Amino acid sequence: MDADKGQGLASAANRFTTRSVDEARAVLSQQFYDMKLDTPSAQDFELDADVVVLGGVTIGRMSFGASIRVYVPDLEGYHVVAPMTGSFSIGQGRAPDTPVSARTGGMMNPPKSFRVGDFSPDCDTLTIKVDKAAVHRQLEVLLGRPAHRNADFSPSFDISQGAGRSWAGLARWAALDANSPGGLLQSPMVRGRIEQTLLEGLLLATDHRYRDALDAPPLSMPAVAVKRVMDAVRDNPAEPWDANRLAAVAQVGLRTLQEAFRSQARMTPMAYVHEVRLQHVRMALRVAAPGETTVTEVAYRWGFAHLGRFSLRYRDRFGEPPSRTLAASRSLARTG
């Protein structure tokens, strides 16, 4: 069907547009939850949405061009809304509705139903489904101990400044980058890191049952545990390490691990991973035979998805660009 004439559903990668309320309801129910969606001004209605799934986090950026009402009878996970323009209200159960806008985001907790109303026609919003189990796992990683109860988020949080603004900005970038050819989210490793950052950031940017525990100073970590992490990285540098896996190796919470690396190694855990991998990249470039490989191939092999940042990091570490290291190895091979 011709999407430019407003007929039917157009989908390019994770982008959806339609002027049909029924088709919009079907698409959003498939991407998020079964829902009731209607509008008092169907003639002005037009869904424009970008959707990206990052493991346990589904991010939608969407506008409707009209006032809408939404009702979700069964909320399976946590749900976050963060308008970029316009405003609307959200509510759960018998609690009073909470207004949300470009300054105030909203949070909804499972398993209660939720509703959306007072949706301004000019509203362009982020709507984000977060898997309940994924939040719980990340919470336990941050705490370094079991969490026996759900997070129970407060119904609103500030997205105009500080951590809330940073979190909403990252979610917006992810929704838009998903449809960028050659964008960073094409890399599975980057997608995994962004998912983890969104989960961790949500717990650090909002109020919930474990907020005070997360704000408490991290426990001290013995040097032997730091060495255990370093040994694991050196023994298996090509593993898809992230901060969560490193904390599991150390058998401590993520905040404790990060503080221990800062105080004992003068770097973050992931900076140490990058340092070990840079050494392997340099070794591979120095021993490469003429025509055997390229800088890009070696960088990707060792987990560096963004070549621009990799080149800067390599130059800062070794005082020359990686291409010069490779050229020197080829020159040496010819003269040898």
Image (cartoon, helix red, strand yellow):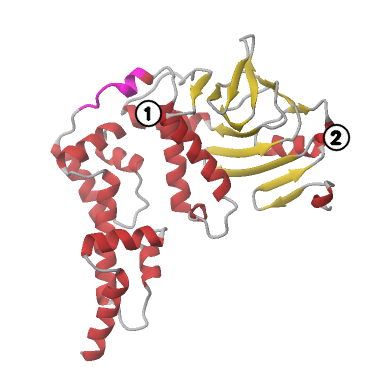
- Amino acid of disc 2: Gln
The answer to whether residue 303 is visible is no
Is 321 drawn above or below residue 241 in the view shown? Answer: below
Please identify the quadrant where the C terminus is shown: bottom left
- Amino acid of disc 1: Glu
Disc assigned to residue 179: none
**Range covered by the magenta-colored residues:** 212-219
Q: Which residue is mark 2?
A: 43
Which residue is depicted at the point 22% across and 84% down? Answer: 332
Q: Which residue is mark 1?
A: 140
Which residue is depicted at the point 58% across and 44% down? Answer: 52
Left-right relation of 8 to 135: right
Which residue is more in the foreground, 159 or 17? 159
Which residue is depicted at the point 51% across and 52% down? Answer: 185
The quarter of the displayed image where residue 246 is located? top left
The quarter of the displayed image where residue 117 is located? top right
Is 20 drawn above or below residue 185 in the view shown? Answer: above
Which residue is more in the foreground, 307 or 151? 307
The image position of residue 30, as x and y in percent, is 69, 38
Is 185 drawn above or below residue 268 in the view shown? Answer: below
Which residue is depicted at the point 46% across and 32% down? Answer: 165
Per the image, label 1 sits on a secondary structure element best described as helix
The image position of residue 215, as x and y in percent, is 31, 22
Spatial CA distance of label 2 from label 1 is 48 Å
| Label 1 environment density (alpha carbons within 10 Å; few <14, some 14–19, many ≥20) | some
Per the image, label 2 sits on a secondary structure element best described as helix
